[in-house]
Image: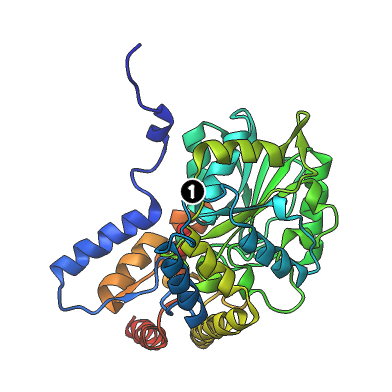
Amino acid sequence: MGIHINEQYNELNESYLFAEIARKVAEYQKANPDKKLLKMGIGDVTRPLARCVTDAMKKASDEMGTAEGFHGYGPEQGYAFLREAIQNYYKKFGVELDADEIFISDGAKSDCGNFPDILSTDCTVLIPDPVYPVYADTNVMAGRKIIYSSANEENHFLPMPDESKVGDIIYICSPNNPTGACYSREQLAAWVAFAKKHNSLILFDAAYECFVTGDLPHSIYEIEGAKDVAVELCSFSKKAGFTGTRCGYTVVPKRIVIDGAVLNKLWIRRQTTKFNGVAYIVERGAEAALTDEGEKEVSENINYYRENAKIMTDTMDELGIYYTGGKNSPYVWLKCPFGMKSWDFFDEMLTKAGIVGTPGAGFGTNGEGFFRLTAFSTRETTIEAMKRLKEYMQSR
Ligand code: MLT
């Protein structure tokens, strides 16, 4: 008896990947205050919010200061105006959603970890390796058994269903963090069929969908039958620069029934108990990002990051470095040169080139020997970093 911690926390690495990197970088910068570091580690945006977004938030803030326009607790599921705007956004991909299938959140990260609250801890979880560390860490916290699908050079970092690895919960991130690899329609259809066959639930993280080009799918619901087996998580962070503003959404189709329970209802039950919704001002800002004017302004920023990614992939091509991503993704996932290990290359980049990246090993065992750079920096930082990388390669 007595108070005890959740012992599952002992199973985690001592600190979260990006917290660990921030600590190492701060320590290095303290010892080398004159060194100008180029930050291309965590996928944090640098372009300011679109003007129509800040205008909408200012207007909402003014409303909040009036008796008529004041808003107290908002709907836990999000305001109808934003859910409708998201419904219309999905129509662009040919996807019809009911407004009550959309839940506004404070970002995809939270719900990636929260959603399994309504699923048994006895479920087995299938997670790609390497991948965004939140999926594994949150399921370790919950004590679920995790199995990994292997993403590697051979399958171009896009693992496909494998009958020897069946998860009750299947996490898929496409375009992928950290590898930037993006599933085709056929590949996603194979995952949907696999989930149906095994009564699994897919948690589809679409946080980077705004970088998708060509005929690749933005949403898993573009695949027939996905509404029977998939929950989709998305965010305004990368699309509209909301990393510090915090707004996202989770789509829970009403068709999904587990143990006789409608998952959508269970999620409402969870949200009304544990969540008080996203701020009215923020939701108005997110709504503005989805208007025609908003889409135009926001896409200018996305194109700016795409151009950064192109500068990076051109450099990799020039240096003959193997990489994935950078085309439908803000991440360039490169093979560490000279057969170096991820954390060794991280140290080399930090101390010799003044570049902060993310060691691939932090995303899973298969990430060893790889390194992730983001295109979310400024143009100047990106150009300077590529110059320094070339100099580093020549100096070896
Ligand atoms: C990343 O760098 O992987 C992301 O920015 C982290 C996040 O979105 O939480």
Q: Residue furthest front?
A: 67
Q: Could you tell me the amino acid type at mark 1?
A: Tyr
Q: Residue 31 vs residue 106: left or right? A: left
Query: Splitting the image into 4 quarters, where does residue 210 fall?
Result: bottom right
Q: Nearer the viewer, residue 299 or 161?
A: 299
Q: Residue at x 55, y 59 (%)?
A: 248
Q: Residue at x 60, y 63 (%)?
A: 176
Q: From this view, report whether residue 134 is shown above or below residue 61.
A: above
Q: Residue at x 71, y 43 (%)?
A: 201
Q: From this view, report whether residue 126 is shown above or below residue 150.
A: above
Q: Residue 296 vs residue 276: left or right? A: right
Q: Nearer the viewer, residue 140 or 112?
A: 112
Label 1, on which residue? 73
Query: Splitting the image into 4 quarters, where does residue 358 fall?
Result: bottom left
Q: Could you tell me if residue 6 is visible in this image?
A: yes
Q: From this view, report whether residue 345 is shown above or below residue 107.
A: below
Query: Splitting the image into 4 quarters, where does residue 245 fall?
Result: bottom left
Determine the secondary structure under disc 1: loop
Q: From this view, report whether residue 148 is shown above or below residue 222.
A: above
Q: Position of residue 269 (x, y in %)?
A: 62, 36
Q: Could you tell me if residue 165 is visible in this image?
A: no
Quarter the N terminus occupies = top left
Q: Residue at x 39, y 73 (%)?
A: 40
Quarter the C terminus occupies = bottom left
Q: Residue 355 vs residue 72: left or right? A: left
Q: Position of residue 212 (x, y in %)?
A: 66, 74
